[in-house]
Image (cartoon, helix red, strand yellow):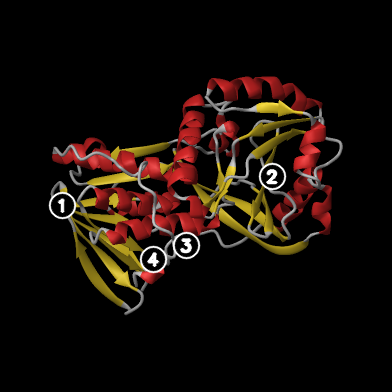
Amino acid sequence: MTHNHVVIIGGGGTAIATMYDLCLRGFKVTLIEKGELTSGTTGRHHGQLHCGARYAMGDKNIARECMAESAILRKIAPNAIEYNMGMFVALNDDDMQYKNNFIQSCLEADIPAKEIPTSLAFEYEKELNRNIKASVLVPDGTIDPWRLAISFASGALKTNNAEIKTYHEVIEINKNGKNIESVTVINHIKNKKEIIKGDIFINATGPWAGNIASLAGIDLSVSPSPGTMLAMKTRISNMVVSRLHKAGDGDIVVPQRNLTIIGSTQWLSDNPDINIVPPEDIDFLNKSAIDIFPCFKHLEYHTAWAAARPLFGKHNSLEGVRNLSRDFAIIDHKVNDNIDNMISIVGGKATTLRAMGEVATNMICKKLGLENKCETANIILPNYREYYRGGYHG
C-alpha cells in the first residue's frame, strides 16, 4: 500500500536515508537535489565513523547515539564501512590530565574505551610520534560517504516508490493557507522551470536548511559553520587517530582509501557555499598532523577543501558556535510556524544519518495516524553498485 507523496529537498546522506525509510514504510517519495547526490556537505566530510568518544565528555546522549548507530551501520552497510578502530593519543601534560576523565566518560556512555601501552600503539601505528605519552583505543572507523549514501539510494529505488531528480534546484515554495502545495524548481539539465507537487515536504538540506526554510517564510536557526580539511597522498595509518584533548581544530587524522586526511578547522560564515580555503588553514593542518605523525611532512599534497557543518542554532562568536550541539533536531513546522505539512531536519552527523531518517519518518507517520514500524536498522543495504546496475542514475 502506498501512502502520501513526500517531497524531500536535499540530496545528502540524511535526505537519502530518510527517503529509504519512507519508501520501506510505503510512501511515494520524490527527492530533489540542485546538484549531484552528495555534492554538498556529505561529499566533503573526512569520513569518520564516530563511536561517540569525541562527545562523551560533553554530551553522553550524543555519544551513546553515535555508538549505537555506528554498530548499526557496520551491520547494514559493510561495503561502505571500514571498521579500523580509533586511537586517542596524548602528546603533552595537558592531554594527560584529560585522559582519565575521558576514559571514564566513554565507559559511562557505553563506549568501550581502554588505555593501551604506548609500545602496543606503536605496533598498531608504526608512524606515530614516538614521544606520545599515552594512547586510548576506541571503536571508531571510516565511512565512504558516497558509497554509504548510494547504498541507501539503491535500497529506496528497489522499492519502486522513489524518484530522484538531480540538478533540480528549488527556487520557490508555493503555499495555500497552512499547506504547501508544491515547489517550483529549475531543471538545470533542460534549463526550464517545473512544478513538483506533494502532500508532505521535508527540508533536509543541511547547512542550506535556513535558506530553504526562508522560501516558506520560516526563520530557521542554522549555523553553516565551515571548516577546512587537507588530504595527502599515501595512507600512513589504518586507524582514525585523534588528539586526547577537548575537541578543537586539526585534531583528527583519518585514513581514506590511499589518502591521509587531517581535519578540521572552523570559522564563522552565513554562507554555506564555501569555495575558498584559507591558506593559513593548510599550514595549520600540516603542523597539527606532523605533531601526531612526523612523517606527514614528507607526504605529497593531494588536495584541500572546505565544507560547512549544518549546526542547529545561532551564535555570534566562534566559541559559541563550537559549543553548539552536534545532536540533530526534527522540526514540525505545524507546531512552530503554522505550516501543516512541512518538517525540517537540522544538525546531526554522518554517523547518525539513519537515525535521523527514522525519527523524521516516525514524525510523519504520527502526523498521519500511521503505525508503520521502522526496519532500516535490520535490513542489509544493497551494494552501492546496484544504483548503476538498476539504471537508476540519470
Q: Earlier in the sequence, mark 1 or mark 2?
A: 1
Q: Earlier in the sequence, mark 3 or mark 1?
A: 1
Q: Nearer the viewer, mark 1 or mark 4?
A: 4
Residue 165 figure quarter: bottom left
Mark carried by residue 4: 1
> Badge 4: how crowded within 10 Å, few (<14), some, or many (20+)?
many
Residue bearing the label numbered 3: 39
**Residue 361 visible in this rendered orientation of the protein:** yes
- Residue 265 versus residue 58 in the image, above or below: below
C-alpha gap between disc 4 and disc 2: 35 Å
Residue bearing the label numbered 4: 387
* Image quadrant occupied by the C terminus: bottom left
Q: Position of residue 121 (x, y in %)?
A: 77, 36
C-alpha gap between disc 1 and disc 4: 25 Å
Residues tagged 3 and 4 counted as in contact (Cβ below 8 A): no
Mark 3: which amino acid? Ser
Residue bearing the label numbered 2: 250
